[in-house]
Image (cartoon, grey):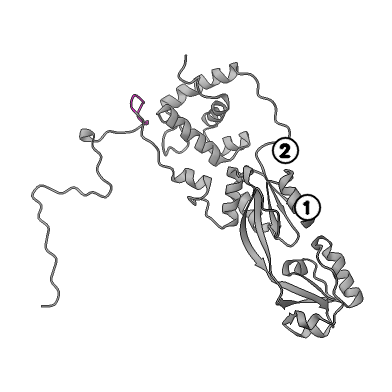
């Protein structure tokens, strides 16, 4: 039995893709997976076999002797394996992110596409009345929601709070103020603005009957009109926007997107891809081949980092005295 037969076929296919193309990014794109995930799989495979499959630091990518041996075996094992079930269009690795009205996702969408160009991200508008259902019925992997939501089985990270504003006609007496209190609205004809999915109609009613409506700042900005103005409210609770996802769906892609939203760098140790970059390589265990190109130091001992060799009999030069 070949020592490679214990390796599952999917990992052999991933290794073969890199070994044949000698380019991690192109191989990842052809496989429809994240480059970071492919790199991590190769590292784990090297650790499992106790040898290097690719020459460390080589540009362009090069196979080691063991890597060439595995490629020959992989081709044979893959050829004799059952054909994988075809993946339907759109069922590859991807991320679906929902967002409710008022949330602007342009920045996070752009950063994701720059950082993970091989993994599609789909930004899906979600009505506020359906934000809870969208998370639980699998319509989206995660969603920018406006609290409150049912937190049972849901993970969430807070993002920001929104000031409430009152929307009034442009020529309304309250339009001259920078801030408005609830006491100043006691005589106003208030429009029901609880359903933020119908905010456009609410603004239409405010303009038509010269009333007023209280909505989050982003909603007023989203549905701004030339005949209406909005002013900051005092004494009214703020609304909070969070990024939420089902607990059992905390995948690596979800964690990566959380890192993007929180402003982490591509190499942050708190993101899966950053952990991969910072992960130390384990030395080959007993009975395993040493890494390709590895050299043994004289006597088998390794110098501590930063240690400086001293010549025999060297005497430390005294420092100069200052002052007297």
Q: Is residue 53 visible?
A: no
Of marks 1 and 2, the one in the foreground? 1
Q: Which circle's residue, 1 or 2, is located before the other in the chain?
A: 2
* 282 sits left or right of 70 in the view: left
Query: Which picture quadrant has residue 36?
Result: top right
Residue 138 placement (x, y as % from top left): 72, 43
User: Residue sitting at 25 percent across and 39 percent down?
Assistant: 302
Tag 1: Cα neighbours inside 10 Å, few (<14), some, or many (≥20)? few
Query: Which picture quadrant has residue 215?
Result: bottom right
Residue 114 placement (x, y as % from top left): 60, 50
Q: Is residue 213 visible?
A: yes
Judging depth in this view, the residue of 121 and 17 nearest the camera is 121
User: Is residue 205 positioned above or below 74 on the image?
Assistant: below
Q: Residue 90 carries which label?
A: 2
Magenta stretch: helix, strand or loop mostly: loop
Q: Which mark is residue 38?
A: none
Quarter of the image where the C terminus is located: bottom left
User: Is residue 154 positioned above or below 208 on the image?
Assistant: above
User: Residue sitting at 63 percent across and 36 percent down?
Assistant: 32
Task: State the residue position of label 1.
Answer: 130
Query: Which picture quadrant has residue 297?
Result: top left
User: Residue sitting at 56 percent across and 58 percent down?
Assistant: 263
Helix or strand or loop: what does disc 2 sit on? loop
User: Residue sitting at 10 percent across and 47 percent down?
Assistant: 312
Part of the protein shown in magenta: 286-292
Judging depth in this view, the residue of 128 and 322 nearest the camera is 128
Residue 189 placement (x, y as % from top left): 87, 77
The residue at the far front in this view is: 152
The residue at the far right in this view is: 208
* 253 sits left or right of 39 in the view: right
């Amino acid at each position: 039995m070949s020592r490679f037969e214990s390796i599952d076929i999917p990992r052999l296919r991933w290794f073969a893709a890199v070994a044949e193309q000698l380019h991690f990014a192109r191989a990842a794109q052809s496989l429809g997976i994240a480059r970071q995930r492919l790199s991590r799989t190769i590292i784990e495979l090297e650790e499992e076999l106790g040898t290097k499959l690719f020459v460390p630091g080589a540009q362009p990518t090069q196979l080691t002797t063991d890597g060439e041996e595995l490629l020959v075996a992989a081709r044979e094992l893959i050829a004799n394996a059952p054909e994988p079930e075809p993946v339907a269009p759109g069922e590859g690795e991807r991320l679906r992110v929902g967002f409710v009205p008022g949330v602007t996702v342009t920045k996070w969408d752009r950063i994701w596409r720059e950082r993970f160009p091989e993994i599609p991200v789909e930004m899906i508008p979600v009505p506020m009345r359906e934000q809870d259902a969208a998370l639980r019925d699998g319509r989206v992997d995660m969603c920018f929601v406006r609290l409150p939501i049912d937190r049972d089985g849901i993970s969430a990270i807070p993002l920001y709070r929104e000031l409430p504003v009152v929307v009034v006609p442009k020529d309304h007496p309250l339009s001259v103020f920078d801030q408005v209190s609830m006491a100043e609205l006691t005589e106003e004809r208030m429009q029901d603005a609880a359903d933020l999915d119908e905010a456009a109609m609410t603004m239409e009613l405010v303009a038509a009957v010269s009333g007023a409506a209280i909505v989050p700042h982003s909603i007023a900005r989203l549905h701004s009109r030339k005949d209406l103005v909005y002013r900051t409210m005092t004494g009214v609770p703020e609304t909070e926007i969070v990024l939420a996802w089902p607990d059992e769906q905390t995948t690596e892609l979800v964690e990566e997107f959380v890192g993007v939203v929180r402003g982490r760098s591509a190499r942050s140790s708190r993101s899966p891809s950053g952990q991969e970059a910072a992960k130390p390589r384990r030395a080959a265990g007993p009975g395993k081949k040493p890494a390709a190109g590895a050299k043994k130091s004289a006597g088998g001992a390794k110098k501590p980092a930063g240690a400086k060799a001293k010549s025999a009999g060297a005497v430390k030069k005294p420092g100069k005295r200052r002052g007297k």
